[in-house]
């Protein structure tokens, strides 16, 4: 599922911006289909414009019936009555999402015989202190089995002691959920930690869900600003 909201805060209408001949959301949809990893790929949107564009280009889309706070809620509404086991959330503003990264988050469920994992997501190591301190970049810390302990816009861990081997990871917003986990998320209210940080993954932790993090070295390009779009055009060429 690719949640697609037209009215993005920082760059309104970004998903319909032209990326070398096609809108960003169409590029993302086509790249996701081409991975060959999924039984079905659908864009779920509140926008007639986005819906029409996907269908016009031969894709599949569903309309959200409700206003939603986040992409997970939008997906949950769409899959509530679908017969699915694993639902993958691909970000609509990441047209360079690659098959290897998506495959990694799906693979964790194949060995999870005890069904210990509620959802899986991606992280990539960051070393630049500007990125580590940037509140627009969500950081994650994990335990010794790579289960998420916490997500924050602040630097975590705080560098109180230097040269202790601490690594810093950026959370990439690709998730793979068991259906029951995303439905629980949909029906459970937001708690104070999520409300404070404005990070939806925290809700899962606050309600005791287990998030398996998978490290990837693929950086990708998120289109959050007009400058990001220009960079994406150059990469696409």
Image (cartoon, rainbow, N blue to C red):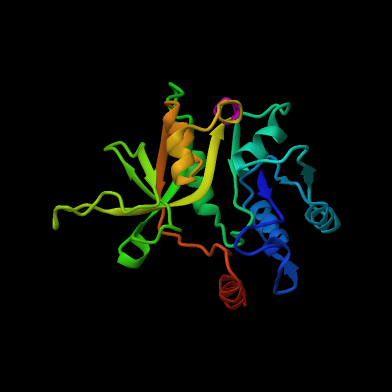
Task: Name the one closer to the observer, 27 or 155.
Answer: 155
Measuring from the top left, give residue 3's x and y in whole percent. 66, 47
Residue at (62, 52) in percent of width and height: 35
Name the residue nearer the viewer: 181 or 85.
181
Question: Position of 24 compared to 208: left or right?
Answer: right
- Magenta residues span 179-183
Q: Is residue 170 magenta?
A: no
Residue 132, image x, y percentages: 34, 60
Q: Say which of 220 and 133 sits in front.
A: 133
The front one of 104 and 213 is: 213
Q: Quadrant of residue 17?
A: bottom right
Taking 119 as reference, is 220 above or below it? below
- Could you tell me which residue is drawn at 75 percent across and 68 percent down? 22
Left or right, 167 with respect to 98, comes to left
How far from the left and from the top, in percent, is residue 218? 45, 60
| Viewport quadrant of the N terminus | top right
- Quarter holding the C terminus is bottom right
Is 183 drawn above or below residue 124 in the view shown? above
């Amino acid at each position: 599922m690719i949640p697609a909201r037209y009215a993005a805060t920082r760059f309104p209408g970004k998903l319909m911006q032209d990326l070398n001949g096609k809108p960003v959301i169409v590029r993302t949809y086509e790249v996701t289909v081409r991975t060959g990893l999924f039984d079905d790929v659908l864009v779920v949107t509140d926008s007639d414009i986005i819906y029409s564009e996907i269908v016009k280009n031969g894709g599949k889309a569903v309309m959200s019936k409700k206003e939603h706070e986040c992409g997970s809620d939008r997906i949950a509404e769409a899959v509530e009555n679908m017969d699915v086991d694993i639902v993958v959330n691909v970000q609509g503003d990441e047209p360079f999402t690659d098959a290897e990264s998506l495959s990694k988050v799906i693979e964790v469920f194949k060995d999870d015989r005890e069904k210990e994992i509620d959802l899986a997501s991606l992280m990539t190591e960051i070393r630049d202190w500007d990125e580590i301190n940037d509140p627009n970049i969500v950081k994650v810390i994990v335990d010794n089995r790579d289960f998420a302990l916490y997500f924050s816009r602040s630097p975590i861990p705080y560098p109180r002691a230097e040269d202790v081997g601490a690594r810093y990871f950026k959370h990439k917003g690709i998730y793979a959920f068991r259906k029951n986990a995303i439905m629980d998320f949909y029906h459970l209210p937001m708690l104070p930690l999520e409300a404070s940080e404005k990070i939806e993954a925290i809700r899962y932790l606050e309600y005791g869900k287990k998030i398996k993090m998978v490290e990837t070295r693929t950086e990708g390009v998120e289109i959050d600003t007009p400058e990001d779009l220009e960079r994406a055009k150059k990469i696409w060429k």
